[in-house]
Amino acid sequence: MGAKCYNCGKGVMYGHNVSHAKNRTRKIFKPNLHSARVFVDGSYKRVKLCTKCLRQLRGQKNVNKKEVSVQPQDAPVLAA
């Protein structure tokens, strides 16, 4: 699965560090992923979610800290 959010698909991005002298060196921007136990298709599954998705899913209902209900990447989650 790698460094990708299960819900939104946010992944690694590439760019440059730019010094004062405009020297450019490669930089990798990684998403802030956290492991969460989610309810998917009738069973619990351990997946990696970015913090934005984790906060949005926890805010929807009264759920435990590490247990949220999520749909796979194809379906929209925030249809409240």
Image: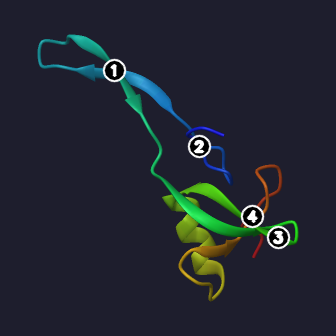
Q: How is the image coloured?
A: rainbow
Specify the label residue 16 is tagged with: 1
Q: Residue at x 62, y 84 (%)?
A: 63
Specify the label residue 10 is tagged with: 2
Mark 3 or mark 2, earlier in chain: 2
Nearest the viewer among 19 and 4 is 4
Provide the secondary structure element on which disc 2 rests. loop
Specify the label residue 43 is tagged with: 3
Q: Quadrant of the N terminus?
A: top right
Task: Write down the quadrant of residue 66 in the picture.
Answer: bottom right
- The crowd level at tag 1 (other Cα within 10 Å; few <14, some 14-19, many 20+) is few
Q: CA distance from mark 4 to mark 1?
A: 33 Å
Which amino acid type corresponds to the residue marked 1 in the rendered image? Answer: His
Nearest the viewer among 13 and 45 is 45
Do the residues bearing badges 4 and 1 touch, measured as CB atoms within 8 Å? no
Provide the secondary structure element on which disc 3 rests. strand
Task: Write down the quadrant of residue 39 in the picture.
Answer: bottom right
Which amino acid type corresponds to the residue marked 4 in the rendered image? Answer: Val
Mark 4 or mark 2, earlier in chain: 2
Q: Tell me residue 73's x, y (percent).
A: 76, 50
Camera-side mark, 3 or 4: 3
Provide the secondary structure element on which disc 1 rests. strand
- The crowd level at tag 2 (other Cα within 10 Å; few <14, some 14-19, many 20+) is some
Camera-side mark, 1 or 3: 3
Q: Residue at x 49, y 60 (%)?
A: 51
Which amino acid type corresponds to the residue marked 2 in the rendered image? Answer: Lys
Provide the secondary structure element on which disc 4 rests. loop
Q: Quadrant of the C terminus?
A: bottom right
